[in-house]
Image (cartoon, rainbow, N blue to C red):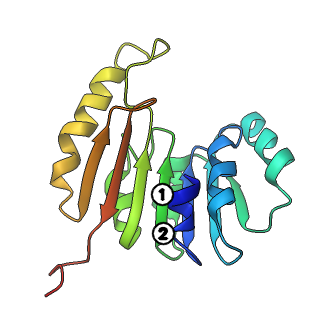
Amino acid sequence: MSTLAASKRGGILVELGTGVGVGTAWLLDGMDAATRLITVENSAAHQEVARRHLGDDPRVCFVYADAERWLRSYAGPRFDLAFVDCRPGKFTGLDRLVRLLRPGALYVGDDLNPQPTWLDDHQDRVDRFVRELPRHERMRWTLMDWASGLVVAARLDDPPYGA
């Protein structure tokens, strides 16, 4: 994540699912002074851990909100990188997030490989997500069977996709 963040100098990054801030720390590690990170979490307790360790960094804005509602209401500039570590932006709201990515932006989603803690219906959710990726013509997707299972994508130019 640090390397991907470093490729977006002066950009705007979004993380959906702050958790306790592990991904946030990696993103901040790669960011230059002009890059900004918005990180959204719906658990106050989890986000408080991240704020306690990373909250003094002026490059990060912590948002306590439901990520799906936040995505629907977001009216700021488009993103240069999205790291999705929760259901919204991956299993729900993906169309909206894709529209919020600038051409050339990167998308990273994790937790696609089966986990013993998954609810019974979660594999179906993952399978549906993977099946639907190709319909997003403005994205180039790569699935990786590594760690928890990843998808990395690049946002292509807006139509007509260049000359």
Q: Is residue 64 among what the camera can see? A: no
Give the residue number, with chain letter if any, for mark 2. Answer: 79
Q: Residue at x 62, y 45 (%)?
A: 23
Residues at marks 2 and 1, CA–CA distance in whole angstroms: 7 Å
Q: 148 or 60: nearer the eye?
A: 148
Q: Which residue is tagged 1?
A: 82
Q: Identity of the amino acid at label 1?
A: Ala
Q: Which mark is residue 35?
A: none
Nearer to the camera, 149 or 49: 149
Q: Can you give x and y, in whole percent of width and height, for residue 13 in the image?
A: 55, 64
Q: Name the residue located 77 percent from the left edge and 34 percent from the top edge.
A: 45
**Does residue 29 appear in the picture of this structure?**
yes
Please identify the quarter of the rendering in which residue 113 is found.
top left
State left or right for residue 130 relative to residue 21: left
Q: Residue furthest front?
A: 3
Name the amino acid, label 2.
Phe
Q: Is residue 56 above or below residue 45?
A: below
In this picture, residue 67 sits left or right of residue 65: left
The answer to whether 98 is drawn above or below residue 46 in the figure is below
The residue drawn where x is 80% and y is 42% is 48
Q: Residues within 10 Å of mark 1 (few under 14, many from 20)?
A: many
Q: Is residue 152 left or right of residue 142?
A: right
Q: Secondary structure at mark 1?
A: strand
Q: Position of residue 151 (x, y in %)?
A: 35, 44
**Mark 2 and mark 1 residues within 8 Å of each other at the beta carbon:** yes
Looking at the rendering, in which quadrant would you find the C terminus? bottom left
Location of residue 145 in the rendering, given as x and y in whole percent from the top left corner: 33, 32
